[in-house]
Amino acid sequence: MTGVLPVTLEESTKTVQALLHSGKEYVCVMKLHSDASEKRVNEVLKEFEDTIYQRPPLRASVKRQLRTRKIYYIDFLEKEERNVLFQVGCEGGTYIRKLCYDVGEVLGCGAHMQELRRTRAGPFVENSETFVTLHDVAYWFIEWQQHKDESTLRKFIQPMETALTLVPKVYIRDSAVDAICHGANLTAPGVLSLETGINNGALVAVLTLKGEAIALAKTFASTEEILNMEHGVVAKTERVLLPRGTYPRVWKSGEK
Amino acid sequence: MPKSLAPWEIERKLMVKTEDKTNVRYGHKPEERPAEEYMRYGVINLDKPAGPTSHEVAAWVKRILNLKQVGHGGTLEA
């Protein structure tokens, strides 16, 4: 299988959690085991839109327990004899091989996955300037080592904040940053601005006004509630991304 | 039940609670990090070739760039 595979370097590996929750998009060739009309295939694919149930396949890296996955959209693209091309936007952890098998069962003729290409992993898409091959990586890295021109690095490496593009954001004061870097929870006075659509219990990215990622956190309140809060804990720090001491320490340590 | 939107279909607006400034003496804008740091805090939007597994591809990137650790966002089976 080919396509979009975000590779996180050293420290940015901590953002993988956010990427796994950001959804995927694939283009897939499904092979039917006997003839079915284009209209019928189209109808059956549409039946798989919304929530589906899947049991992970025998060869899977997770527990084989029936679980639900969201199919955001599934669009029929083309059919040539028994080959069906379709595009699907789905939640991370959806098995497309399994989806093809199940589509085949509903059609009654049987089907299997023939070819798969990932066209999107969260914020990362193909058809973008940042999309590079292993050859590009090797080439630009040697180029960088020889000339030390920093613009070369930017041709094939994106800042880790790119991986957090689809995670709702909370911007905080400089004075609140270092406490978060030490693992403290985010409190209301530190919050400067935040994005709409945050629910209680949501994963958010906590950022400085410069746009640097400080941490991933789980909220205790919604956007509206946080906007009206004057004190109290707003989010629990889950994963610290910024090193301690980047911003000055202005908080007092608690009494023991 | 309303159709659920893909994460990339959701539009969000920024709501301001209070205004403040950031001190230029601390930290960096992500795109202005010094080179070594920029790499260690970087992500590659890689086109995975057919054949090797996601793990193998990540391991190649690690070797090419001479890094200690790399990860990948979601296995794309071989």
Image (cartoon, grey):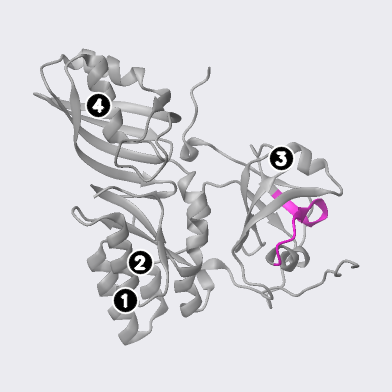
Between marks 2 and 4 in the image, the one whose residue lies nearer the viewer: 4
* Residue A27 painted magenta: no
Q: Amino acid at mark 2?
A: Phe
Q: Amino acid at mark 1?
A: Phe
Disc number at residue A141? 1
Residue A229 at what x, y percent from top left? Answer: 83, 44
The relative height of residue A71 versus residue A162 in the rendered view (above or below) is: above
Q: Are marks 1 and 2 in contact (CB under 8 Å)?
A: yes
Q: Are marks 1 and 3 in contact (CB under 8 Å)?
A: no
The mark nearer the N terminus, 1 or 4, is: 4
Residue at 44% across / 41% down in the picture?
A: A23
Label 2 vs label 4: CA separation?
37 Å
Segment tinted magenta in the rendering: A182-193
Label 4 vs label 3: CA separation?
41 Å
Residue A55 at what x, y percent from top left? Answer: 37, 30
Q: Which residue is mark 4?
A: A101
Q: Quadrant of residue A64?
A: top left
Q: Chain of mark 4?
A: A
Q: Are marks 3 and 2 in contact (CB under 8 Å)?
A: no
Q: Which residue is mark 2?
A: A156
The mark nearer the N terminus, 1 or 2, is: 1
Between marks 1 and 4 in the image, the one whose residue lies nearer the viewer: 4
Q: Quadrant of residue B59?
A: bottom left
Q: Which residue is mark 3?
A: A223
Q: Secondary structure at mark 1?
A: helix
